Amino acid sequence: MAVTREPQQKRAIEKKNKIVQAGYEMFAQKGYYNTNTAEIAKAAGVSTGIVYGYFHDKKDILIDVLDIYIAHAYQPIFDLLDSFDLSKDMASLIPAVLDEAVKIHADNAAIHEALHSLTQHKDVESKFMALEEEVTRRMTAKLEEAGVRLAHLNEKVHWAMVSVQSYAHERVFDHHAYIDYDVMRDIVVGLLHNLFGV
Amino acid sequence: MAVTREPQQKRAIEKKNKIVQAGYEMFAQKGYYNTNTAEIAKAAGVSTGIVYGYFHDKKDILIDVLDIYIAHAYQPIFDLLDSFDLSKDMASLIPAVLDEAVKIHADNAAIHEALHSLTQHKDVESKFMALEEEVTRRMTAKLEEAGVRLAHLNEKVHWAMVSVQSYAHERVFDHHAYIDYDVMRDIVVGLLHNLFGV
Amino acid sequence: MAVTREPQQKRAIEKKNKIVQAGYEMFAQKGYYNTNTAEIAKAAGVSTGIVYGYFHDKKDILIDVLDIYIAHAYQPIFDLLDSFDLSKDMASLIPAVLDEAVKIHADNAAIHEALHSLTQHKDVESKFMALEEEVTRRMTAKLEEAGVRLAHLNEKVHWAMVSVQSYAHERVFDHHAYIDYDVMRDIVVGLLHNLFGV
Amino acid sequence: MAVTREPQQKRAIEKKNKIVQAGYEMFAQKGYYNTNTAEIAKAAGVSTGIVYGYFHDKKDILIDVLDIYIAHAYQPIFDLLDSFDLSKDMASLIPAVLDEAVKIHADNAAIHEALHSLTQHKDVESKFMALEEEVTRRMTAKLEEAGVRLAHLNEKVHWAMVSVQSYAHERVFDHHAYIDYDVMRDIVVGLLHNLFGV
DNA sequence: CATGAATGAGTTTTCATTCAT
DNA sequence: AATGAATGAAAACTCATTCAT
């Protein structure tokens, strides 16, 4: 049975990263099922064999791609939350998060779709679930810290998060001719302000 | 090259329907890429060969499954809209739609995921886009017919639709321990009432 | 998951037989591990794919090859036992069996080696074990039927069987220059006659 | 091409021995074809690369394993023969050899099978052939030295050796419910005593 | 029209052997 | 000498699609 190397050396880590990066790009371009390991290897500039030195199987690459995606996609939101001074300017948090989410979504659109399409795989689904919980938890803590005392804060924050994701998704993917997306942005901001009584 | 017959005979139509139905069930269970044509044929009680008498290729089955899904999932919403007497009771429309959406989603959850995961295929994406436009268009017409005169009605209705979908999805799929989904429902209803000034 | 066809039609049975036969020949020639499924398919004049229509995996071919071998190799011994009239001429049974065993062994030498080398696989081992029991059982029954009443008949018969196998193997495989195999035959016959008091 | 060094240094010899020992154990456990060189290296506590500093290829390890096995398995028999005083007690030699063979077989059962399964390789086959000749030769010499004068002594001794091997194999590997192996031992001893007129 | 056996290119995965360090 | 990462050819197995009956 193949033993997956957990690379200690810098070179090896870099190579593993190259494979994950290549997987990231290929999955984003063509989806998980339309990408084969040979393509990933080629895109990473390595042999097919070594892929199995770093990853147990193809799904294992997916998991690492997912982790990278999560880091890419959610860290900026976490950073924004951490750095935001709610005491001064609570009202501008929501549009800031919204705009940041759109930016992130635009940068990660393809892979986002590719990964979300795999929630039938329990590994993938649970990562996304955990992530949503983390976002809600952090946001709730931030608000409570800022003195916000609202009934059902968890549910409100969670819904705000869902709204932000939905909005970003719509804005990046759908281009309905009859929609003015800047108007939609204002509508969403208005609703969320209403939600938090800002 | 196989010539796809557009079957005139009742028997043939029934057979085609059985295949689509089988595809529907298998895709819902295991996803498009993890279902093979032999399985579909077997589930439909037909030979593998005849599948290609009715469909050009595997993707072609998917398209028909998608159409069925759309009929299943959206017709009830359309019917609700058509039958609703807005002049009498505008406030109850939103919770009615919300609850109907959850019901539909619960019935079609697996296939919904399976199909949404395929929006990388242009065929699939454009069908979903068209559908959203249709919902927004009908809803907007309904509201205007009932005398609603709101700025940016299209955007508001579209966002309402997105919210309904998101809510249904959350309710059916995610089971975060820290969320009371009845509370979330009331929050969403409140926001949408606010949106339409009800 | 692939479903192994259990062929009903004559043509299919013939094809399955061709594959097993090809497996038989290839395993005999080059051993199990040095034969790949593509080679078997080619030798059988079929595609690689259809092999997996008839067999679950490569090991599954081996099992069928084993069954054929057993039929080839043991049926003549069983037939000999069944037809032999012990009441008339008990002494000649042993040399008859010995000579028959050598003939069979010569005909099946390569595959015999190839198969015996796989007794680490439980499937293979248990088939051989069962077969030995069958031989001992039949032989013992035959002797008792002929009025032989010896202490420890089972052990004696079993040992006789082992001796026959060993002798046949030596005769067919080993060609030690210092051994006169006809002399060795007489020695073995003598011992076995002694064993059964003939 | 790798140049196989014949290591002069003690350390190198020890390392080579460790590899062979690891090969011995792995082959015994899982067979030659189911053991890969990385496993052997790991079990030996060396790098995969250095294996090819000591051995030309994987088969080369097998040859050395075979030599070790032979030393383990046959030296005790040779020692027994050398030390046995035939003039005093000829009758007890046979059971002594038999019991020793069983003991050896029990200790080396797995590797014995693993190696015997490779007699398709000419290297392996010829080693086993040579070994059998050596055993027969030594035994015959011993007997002649003790004044035994029997017709066809070579064939008798060879057959005795075969019998001993078969008995040990049966006793160690096969566990037929209907066989009492102590009874079988007595039967074999009886036959061999008969063979040599003891 | 219908069957289901057959095809064969394509996919994942393994592993003996080499090579840069 | 030693390491262990890297190679890439080869193996097992899958499956959309075709075709003989």
Image (cartoon, coloured by chain):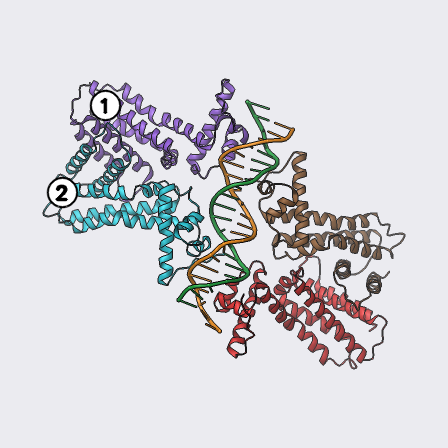
Chain colours: A brown, B red, C cyan, D purple, E orange, F green
Residue C179, labelled with which disc?
A: none
In terms of secondary structure, where does tag 2 sit?
A: loop
Q: Is residue C183 left or right of residue B80?
A: left
Residue B119: horizontal and vertical position, in percent?
67, 61
Which quarter of the picture shows residue C10? bottom left
Q: Residue furthest left?
A: C88
- Whether residue B180 is situated above or below residue D6 in the rendered picture: below
Kindly tell me whether residue B44 is visible in this rendering: yes
Which quarter of the picture shows residue C8? bottom left
Which quarter of the picture shows residue D68? top left
Q: Residue furthest right?
A: A88
- The residue pinned by badge 2 equals C92
Is disc 1 surrounded by few (<14), some (14 to 19) or many (20+) residues within 10 Å?
Answer: some
Is disc 2 surrounded by few (<14), some (14 to 19) or many (20+) residues within 10 Å?
Answer: some
Q: Quadrant of the C terminus of chain C?
A: top left
Q: Are marks 2 and 1 on the same chain?
A: no
- The residue pinned by badge 1 equals D140
The amino acid pointed to by label 2 is Ser
Kindly tell me whether residue C118 is visible in this rendering: no
Q: Which subunit holds the residue at mark 2? A: C
In terms of secondary structure, where does tag 1 sit?
A: helix
- Whether residue B6 is situated above or below residue D80 in the rendered picture: below
Instruction: Report the front residue among C178 and A58.
Output: C178
Q: Is residue F7 left or right of residue E5?
A: right
The amino acid pointed to by label 1 is Thr
